[in-house]
Amino acid sequence: MNLVQNMNDNQLKAILKTEGAVMVIAGAGSGKTRVLTNRIAYLISEKNILENNILAITFTNKAAKEMKERIYALVGETSKYIWINTFHSMCVRILRQHIELLGYNKNFTILDTSEQKSIIKNIVRSLDLSEDAYQPANVLKIISNAKNSLVSVKKMREQSRFGFMKNVAEIYAHYQSYLKKNSVLDFDDLMLKTIVLFKKFPEVLAIYQNQFQYIHVDEYQDTNVIQYRLIKMLSAVHKNVCVVGDDDQSIYSWRGACSDNIINFEKDFDDVELVFLDQNYRSNSTILDAANAVIKNNTDRKEKALWSENKGGGKISVYAASNDKDETDDIAKKILELKKEGIDYKDIAILYRANYLSRQMENSCLSFGIPYKLIGSLKFLQRQEVRDLLAYLNVIVNRADEFSLRRIINVPKRGVGASSMDKIDKYAEQYGISLFEALKNIEAVGVSKKIVTNIQLLTNLIEKYSEIDKYSIDELIIGIYKDSGYENMLKESNDPYAESRIENISELVSSAKQFSNMNDSLIDFISEMSLTSDSDDENQEDAVVLSTVHASKGLEYKVVFIMGLEENLFPSIRDAESSADEKNKMEEERRLAYVAITRAKERLFMSYANRRMQFGSIKMNKRSRFLDEVPNKLMHFESSFGGSFESTESNVDQANKFISRLSPKIKISEKPKSSVSTNYGVGDTVLHKKFGEGKVLVISTDSVKVEFSEVGVKTLLIEYANLTRKD
DNA sequence: CCCAATTAACTTTTT
DNA sequence: GTTAATTGGG
Ligand SMILES: Nc1ncnc2c1ncn2[C@@H]1O[C@H](COP(=O)(O)OP(=O)(O)OP(=O)(O)O)[C@@H](O)[C@H]1O
């Protein structure tokens, strides 16, 4: 049958050895994930294993979704009973069942990073420590590391009795008790509390140890200590574990990922079957040769010889841009050409090192009329209006969550400021009751009449919608949105973002509707909203993908652009502690470059800008060392001069000279003045495919400024805007 | 207590 | 250059 038919011998070995421990270590695009999906399908259809007894752990929710779809295609409807999820969502699922044993509400709230920071900040203030010395981000990092290494508050207090770390331990202690009091967990707690639960209640652990007969882990090189511990605990009964990974793609060490887990696996599990895959099915040999050449510069790695049957392929195009706008405009133009050649937008990805680089690219996409999809960045779920409404939901399911309650107590404005808040807190403390109970007794607190009425409206609202069975999730959100006065607040405000806020809320409502339709509970909805970073565009038309390299891990595209290949940007190294540390960080950057290059199947474009706007001022960076590590014979150079040439190995110097000529001193020649004629003039009403109707304000040599009735004033390039006059 | 105006922070990477 | 955070007047 075709589950095994198309697999090569080594892939087969990993699929057919279903019992015991299996570790597949292999380079990018060698079919590791494919091994996992086929293996799971094989267990079900050939070995008659029940779906419920199979666990598969992926790195991202997106990867989980993709794996679910692939397995669904192989085994059908019943695939929904397989546990396919990230470590974090698996832990949430387990904790929602059992966390009451640890004294938390099973509807616990999950914090995001900015919420964590604000809690830390409050604690630092309350302990009278300097906010400069104890920056929330730093303290949080230390606490997170501690949690990921299973260091408890008690242990940290014992280890650090003096100075800075003593205070950090104190903050840690306050932080944890605050979280517990509010029945709130942070991301690290999800795994930590699961481990604690398993340790304290072996009978709970036993349920899952018995259930998970077959355990699979994708992207194994990026698991951390605590995750490894979980794998070991869960697999202790059946001992059937299959992990796949690639040490060259380990790019999350800053988050505690520990590629030593690869070595530990061999030590800790008995009779590990090691499988190596060396045929790359994804990329052509030009791309693969480039990737291999770059990663070869890392000394701390096992040599792998990846090869591809797809010989040749066009040269890699390298563009030396004069500045950041020139770079992204060039990418946009190339995308339009590719589109003309028949390549769909959705088969094209633009990858960059840091999220902020997407902005300029977005501008270029807009002015060239290219549809795009932003992955991960401007996180929909982190928008304040979305967070506010979710905070209402949190209070509804988890009354102990005072953090969320404080967030919404004066949103929309109810006249409750710092001093009234103080009174309420004092009252609650005096009578030893919760914040919510204090609000229910607001008349006794001694605040103004106005506040009393407003707070009573709030508590009534929360109690009304606490009867969650009466409402679907979307009804609930709409109800809160309208009854709380949030809607009026937005509609009446002159906040320029009000309109987009309203739009975001309707997007939230529509994803809630999807959840309701699938019969998933409110709690499922809240969990998902806290765990996933990018909202799923259901209307994902044909659009170019803009993504960080990190977020592109495991995915593949026909055409890939890697932009911003400059020293200090990609590679980007900050605050190295020692030269050894710096070397490690550089190697991780190089692995990141390797990941980026190996996302491409057919064509690869790379670019850098000689000058770039950073922090509001112009920065000049040299081109990235990673470009120099690719053999010149694989590349084709172009520059903003319009010049371009092929390079052979014999004229490496020529290539470098050519590139260095593009020094920032040189005045970059203007783009050829386009003599594109227009059939519209200033003052005319015109139509744009995406922006709709607008009025022409200014026409210059190559661009046109239009005031659109729906999206406001935009400057577009005449050549690409494709405007038509409306009579 | 609220809003507008001024000032500071931001740019790694994510579950 | 943009956005969040803080400050001070109403
Ligand atoms: N035996 C095979 N024959 C043909 N194509 C294959 C085979 N195995 C995998 N592929 C294809 O190769 C591509 C890469 O596979 P896959 O994503 O599983 O690789 P991977 O090793 O997980 O990559 P990465 O390390 O980048 O995550 C996919 O398009 C997949 O369909």
Image: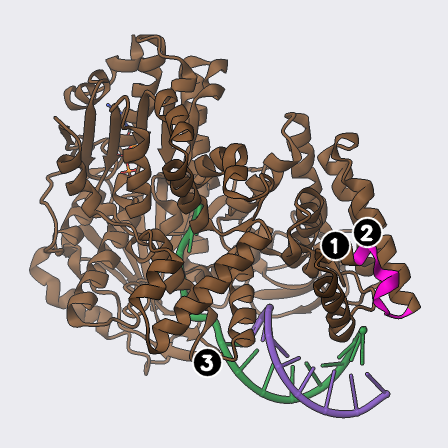
Chain colours: A brown, B green, C purple
Depth check, mark 2 against mark 3: the one in front is: 2
Answer left or right for A604 relative to A524: left
User: Dot 1: few (<14), some (14–19), or many (≥20) neighbours within 10 Å?
Assistant: some
Question: What residue appears at the point 27 percent right and 39 percent down from the top-left corner?
Answer: A220
Depth check, mark 1 against mark 2: the one in front is: 1
| Residue in the foreground of this view, choosing between A6 and A660 | A6
Numbered label attached to residue A436: 1
Q: Mark 3 near mark 1, Cβ–Cβ under 8 Å?
A: no
Residue sticking out furthest to the front: A431
Q: Secondary structure at mark 3?
A: loop
Inspect the magenta stretch and tell me whether residue A442 lies in it: yes
Question: What residue appears at the point 36 percent right and 38 percent down from the top-left corner?
Answer: A199
Which residue bears the numbered disc 2? Answer: A459
Q: Secondary structure at mark 2?
A: helix
Q: Give the image location of residue A281, x and y in percent.
A: 24, 31
Q: Mark 1 near mark 2, Cβ–Cβ under 8 Å?
A: yes
Dot 1: chain letter = A
Q: Give the image location of residue A51, x and y in percent.
A: 41, 16
Q: Are marks 2 and 3 on the same chain?
A: yes
- Relative vertical location of residue A672 with respect to residue A164 in this rendering, above or below: above
Q: Give me the C-alpha separation between circle 2 and circle 3.
A: 38 Å
Q: Amino acid at mark 2?
A: Thr
Q: Amino acid at mark 1?
A: Phe
Which residue bears the numbered disc 3? Answer: A132
Q: Give the image location of residue A338, x and y in percent.
A: 41, 44
Q: Secondary structure at mark 1?
A: helix
The region drawn magenta spans A439-448
Inspect the magenta stretch and tell me whether residue A384 lies in it: no
Q: Amino acid at mark 3?
A: Asp
Residue A716 visible at all: yes
Q: Give me the C-alpha separation between circle 1 and circle 2.
A: 8 Å
Dot 3: chain letter = A
